[in-house]
Image (tube, rainbow, N blue to C red):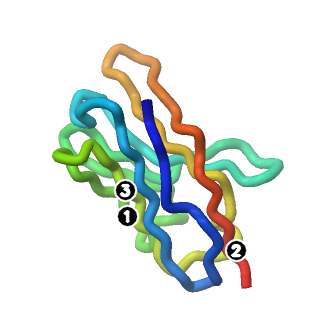
Amino acid sequence: QLVESGGGLVQPGGSLRLSCVASRTIISFNNMGWYRQAPGKQRELVARISSGGNTNYADSLKGRFTIYRDNAKNTVYLQMNRLKPEDTAVYYCNAEEYYGGGYWGQGTQVTVSS
């Protein structure tokens, strides 16, 4: 089970930090990541972190978004800075199993608007 929090309304240029708490130790997953889906668009990868701590990001978001984790809290975070209106979307946490398949959180809405 994955539970996200931290979404909300923020002005352009502002910051938000999303949290995803897993019901088991997060390093037991192959990867954990954040995806987003804007209205009328497909879900897309935002950032991902492997069990070994390697990260990768959508090219368009590098430098503004940072994924990191706290293993002791079974939590993965997404720090989002210099937010733009086009970042408005529902953000989903994902946990990928080593053998395939995985889990999704319920999503948290991020709205960037003045």
Q: At x 50% / y 65%, what residue is drawn?
A: 61
Task: Name the residue that disc number 2 marks.
Answer: 85
Query: Label 1 sits on what residue type?
Result: Thr
Q: SS at mark 1? A: strand
Q: Earlier in the sequence, mark 2 or mark 1?
A: 1
Query: Label 2 sits on what residue type?
Result: Pro
Task: Name the residue that disc number 1 marks.
Answer: 66
Q: Earlier in the sequence, mark 3 or mark 2?
A: 3
Task: Name the residue that disc number 3 marks.
Answer: 77
State yes or no: discs 1 and 3 in contact (Cβ < 8 Å). no
The spot of residue 112 in percent (x, y) is 67, 73
Q: At x 57% / y 85%, what residue is drawn?
A: 13
For residue 31, above or below residue 17:
above
Q: CA distance from mark 1 to mark 3?
A: 8 Å
Position of 35 with respect to 100 (left or right) is right
Position of 74 with respect to 106 (left or right) is left
Residue 53: image tag: none
Furthest toward the right, the residue is 40
